[in-house]
């Protein structure tokens, strides 16, 4: 089964808003057996929308539309859909009740403009939107299903989960699809591909492998199609095989993160962590505090960006900085050990580097980062060279630091 996503809005095309809806919709559709064949973005223009709908209807069995359902004049999706399906508008009492309820709980009266939200094309099935004022709409014509939803992410997700996906599951019989993703860090895509070339060459035709590289990491996604029990058994065998081949670089599976995996390790062993950050500027702390429940094991951080702050806040000896430079093994080791003392934690990570684009020297070029990690038993440090992209250097250094601590704790039997 094929699906197409059509996103509507000038704000998407000029980059004012990033389209996160399509990625989320694609994941959900894949889980129910639909393959997203194409994603199309069009402006708030009648002709563009009509053309996109007509073209999609020739390619796929399911068209998912987001955006352009607000109450203002620039939102023309509903009007254009009525034209496309050759129908007029009717007043939907159930859609109006949803609008009325939302205004009531906010202590407001429904405005005439918002009352218009309850007018829908006469041949659509209303998809109840209980978290917003714009109802979704479901159309069926010539064997193709169309679902129109608001572009506001939380409203779109509500309609997908409570209206669209349940209807799709009951209407279409789709094949079983299973994805498993192995998460690696510290090895590039090409090197990883060489390492597992024979594994990839011997995959059965109903299982595919995809490489999904990001800054400092590569996700290996195995996808299988077929009879459920058989695919689950095959996938289990292949994941175990691949896991053994990449175990040196593997840190987790599927939707896990390095911060989350490390957090689980800390929690299970009653350990705590602090950070002392220079070039990463608090990004490591951000990754850690993005994990629900991190207050149980994350105690705090210092961001010591200047020489003075390293000395005055963390107690790094001034003479050490003068002798070795701020970007050095000696300084970052002092930072990590003093962070443990300052915040009273059993573990810590520290970074000091040259994120760029300026500040490099022949012996310490832009992208040079020293990372130190400390467990209850020992402290280790290493230098990494991460290139001249500032944001990439910050991200890779952050994840490398967390992974270094994870691997150190595991090596100690935790």
Image: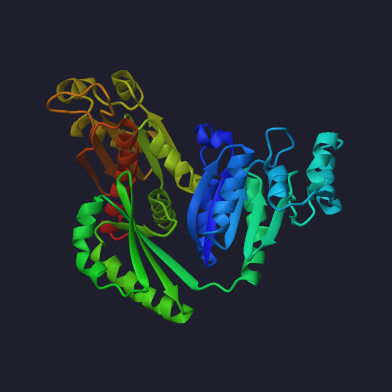
Task: State the image coordinates of residue 45 (x, y, percent, origin top left).
Answer: 62, 37
Toward which corner of the image does residue 332 lie, by quadrant?
Answer: top left
The residue located at (38%, 33%) in the rendering is 342
**Nearest the camera: 116 or 59?**
59
Most distant residue in the left direction: 363
* Closest to the observer, 162 or 248: 162
- Describe residue 198's horizontal placement relative to residue 118 as left or right: left
Q: Nearer the viewer, residue 39 or 314?
A: 39
Q: Is residue 375 visible?
A: no
Q: Is residue 197 visible?
A: yes
Q: Quadrant of residue 114?
A: top right
Report the residue at 67% width, 54% height from top. Answer: 159
x, y (%) of residue 80? 69, 44
Q: Position of residue 148 (x, y in %)?
A: 66, 51
Coloration of the structure image: rainbow
Quadrant assignment, res 248: bottom left
- Quadrant of the snapshot with the C terminus: bottom left
- Along the horizontal axis of the image, is 92 left or right of 74? right
Image spot of residue 218 (x, y percent)? 31, 52
């Amino acid at each position: 089964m094929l699906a197409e996503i059509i996103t509507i809005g000038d704000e998407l095309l000029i980059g004012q808003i990033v389209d996160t809806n399509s990625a989320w919709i694609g994941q959900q559709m894949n889980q129910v057996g639909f393959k997203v064949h194409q994603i199309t973005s069009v402006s708030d223009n009648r002709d563009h929308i009509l053309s996109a709908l007509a073209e999609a209807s020739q390619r796929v069995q399911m068209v998912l539309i987001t955006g352009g359902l607000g109450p203002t004049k620039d939102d023309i999706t509903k009007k254009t859909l009525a034209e496309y399906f050759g129908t007029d508008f009717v007043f939907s009492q159930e859609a109006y009740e949803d609008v009325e309820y939302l205004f009531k709980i906010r202590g407001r009266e429904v405005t005439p403009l918002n009352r218009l939200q309850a007018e829908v094309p006469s041949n659509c099935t209303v998809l109840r939107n209980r978290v917003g004022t714009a109802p979704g709409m479901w159309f069926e014509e010539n064997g193709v299903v169309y679902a129109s939803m608001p572009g506001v992410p939380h409203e779109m997700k509500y309609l997908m989960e409570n209206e669209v996906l349940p209807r799709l599951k009951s209407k279409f019989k789709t094949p079983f699809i299973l994805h498993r993703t192995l998460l690696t860090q510290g090895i590039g895509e090409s090197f990883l591909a060489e390492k597992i070339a024979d594994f990839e060459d011997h995959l059965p035709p109903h299982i595919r492998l995809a490489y999904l590289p990001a800054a400092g990491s590569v996700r290996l996604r195995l996808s299988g199609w077929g009879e459920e029990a058989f695919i689950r058994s095959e996938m289990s065998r292949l994941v175990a095989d691949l896991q053994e081949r990449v175990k040196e670089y593997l840190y987790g599976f599927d939707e896990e993160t390095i911060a989350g995996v490390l957090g689980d390790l800390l929690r299970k062993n009653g350990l705590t962590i602090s950070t002392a950050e220079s070039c990463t500027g608090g990004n490591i702390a951000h990754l850690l505090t993005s994990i629900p429940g991190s207050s149980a094991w994350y105690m705090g951080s210092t961001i010591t960006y200047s020489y003075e702050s390293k000395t005055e806040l963390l107690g790094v000896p001034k003479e050490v900085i003068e002798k070795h430079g701020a970007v050095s093994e000696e300084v970052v080791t002092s930072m990590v050990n003093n962070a443990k003392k300052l915040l009273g934690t059993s573990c810590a990570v520290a970074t000091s580097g040259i994120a760029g684009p300026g500040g490099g020297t022949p012996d310490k070029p832009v992208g040079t980062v020293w990372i130190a990690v400390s467990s209850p038993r020992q402290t280790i440090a290493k230098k990494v060279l991460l290139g001249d992209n500032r944001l990439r250097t910050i991200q890779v250094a952050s994840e490398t630091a967390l992974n270094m601590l994870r691997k150190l704790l595991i090596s100690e039997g935790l």
